[in-house]
Amino acid sequence: MNLKKIVRKVVPKTAVKILEESYRKGRGLALQARYGFPARGMRVIAVTGTNGKSTTCAFINEVLKAAGYKTAVLTTVFYEVDGQVTPNKTHFTIDRQSIVQSFFAKAKNADVDFVIFEVTSHALDQHRIMGVKVEIAAITNLTQEHLDYHGTMQEYARAKSLLLREYGAKQAILNIDDEWYEYFRGRSKAQVFTIGTKTQADLRIKAVKLDQDGSSAELAGKDFKAAVSTNIIGEFNLYNAAVAAAVGNILNLDPEIITKGIANLKKVDGRMQRVEAGQNFEVFVDFAITPDAIEQALLSLRQITKGKLRIVFGATGDRDKQKRPKMGEVAAKCADYIYLTDDETYTEEPALIREAVYKGIKAAKGTKKTIVIPDRREAIAAAFKDSQKGDAVLLTGIGHEDTRNIGGRQIPWNEAKIAEQLLKGR
C-alpha cells in the first residue's frame, strides 16, 4: 500500500482534503519556480466543458493562425507549438501539474502570441493550472460526466466554474442554450459573451445546414456577420466553431479571417472522423463517452443519413456508472441498430458494464434492435456486414486513442485504422 492510500485510510476525510490541498498548492508553486514561472505575461485562452473541448481549441487555433498569430495548443487529442503538432499519446489532458508548466515553458521558448488549452474539471478542482492567468475563458456545455469523482452535478458545475473565477479571466464565452448557462453566468467574474441559437445571444447561430460534405451556419452579432462552414459533421460542432468565432470577435478580428480559420480545420482525430475505404455507406469514429455526446452525434448523422443508422459502442470501466443506462437509452431512441460491445474495461468485469448499458436499452424498448458482441473488432465487423448503401455507422467511445485498457492492461488499438482494415476486407 502506498503512502497516499495509508494516509487516506487512517486520517479523517476533512483532514485528508486539507492535506491534499496544501500539498497540491505547494507542489504547484515549486513547479512554477522550477520552470521559471513560464505562464507569466502570456496571453491565454482556456476551454472547459463536458463535450467539445478539443475541437473548440482546434477551431480557435486555426482562427488565430489565420490572423497571423503564433500559437501553442494543449488538448486531449494533440499538442501544437508554433505549427509543430504532436499527438497526445496519453488518455488525459492535464493529469499532472508538471504537464502545464513544461508546456508553457515550451510555448514561451517558442515566443508564441497565444496559448490555447483544454482544462478538465479534475485539473481545476486539483489546482493543476496554478500560475496561469487566463485572458478568455470558454465553457462549451455541461452534461452528466465524472460523477464518480464529483458526486453531484452541482459539484461538477462548481469545479468547472472555477475557470471563470479563480484565474483572472477578463472575458467569458458561454453557451446560452445550455441548461447550466444561468449558473455559470452567475458565477462568472468575467464579462460574459454568449453564443447560441437564442435571439438574445451575442453571437447567434442561424441557418444551420448539415450535409454529406460538412456543416455550415450563419453567425450574427452586433457589428458582426459571417457565414461559416466546416468539413466536420455535426450541429454541435457549429457551436464549437461559434466559440472560436466569439474569440475572434472579442479580439476584433475581421469576419473573413474568422471564416477562413474555421474552414481551415479539416479534421480532429477521433472527433466525427470519417473513414473511407470505398464502401457505399458512411462510417464515423467519435470519442463520445457521455449520453449527451452520443445523442448529439446520432441526431446529427440522422439528418444526413438516407438509410439506417447503426451504432457500435460500450461504456468505460472504473468511471461514472450512473451514466451507463442513460447511454443505452439514448442509443435506443436515436439509432436504428445497436451493436453493444466493450469499450475500455479497466479493472471492471466487462459483462457487468454491458449489463448496465443494456438496462437503459431495455428501458427504452430497444432490445429487438440490439446485438451484444463483447469483442469490439467483431462488433464493428458485424455492423459493417449488415450495412447497406446509404446507411451510416457510428463508432463511439475510443476516438483518437491508440490503446485500450482491458483488464488493467494496455493493448494497441486504433479505431479508425481498424475500421479501414475491416472495410477493405469486407
Image: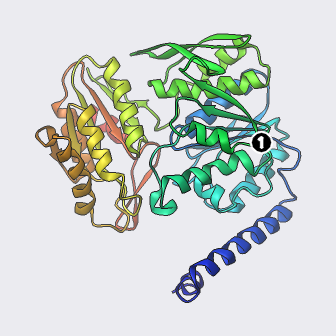
Query: Taking 277 as reference, is 352 left or right?
Result: left
Name the one closer to the observer, 287 or 106. Answer: 287
Q: Is residue 359 above or below residue 237?
A: below
How many marks on residues? 1
Q: Is residue 421 above or below residue 160?
A: above
Percent from the top left, x then y, of residue 119?
A: 63, 48
Q: Residue at x 63, y 59 (%)?
A: 125
In the displayed image of the protein, which residue is found farthest to the left? Answer: 368
For residue 241, say whether it is visible: yes
- The amino acid beneath tag 1 is Ala
Q: Residues within 10 Å of mark 1 (few under 14, many from 20)?
A: many
Name the one closer to the observer, 392 or 136. Answer: 136
The kind of secondary structure element at disc 1 is: loop
Task: Name the quadrant containing residue 3.
Answer: bottom right
Q: Residue at x 74, y 10 (%)?
A: 223
Percent from the top left, x then y, of residue 254?
A: 76, 14
Q: Is residue 227 above or below residue 423?
A: above
Q: Residue at x 25, y 34 (%)?
A: 333
Name the residue tied to disc 1.
Answer: 169
Percent from the top left, x then y, of residue 37?
A: 86, 57
Query: Taking 26 as reference, is 273 left or right?
Result: left
Query: Taking 27 as reference, is 388 left or right?
Result: left
Q: Is the image coloured rainbow, by chain, by secondary structure, or in one colour?
A: rainbow
Percent from the top left, x then y, of residue 63?
A: 69, 24
For residue 89, say whether it is visible: no
In the displayed image of the protein, which residue is found farthest to the bottom? Answer: 10
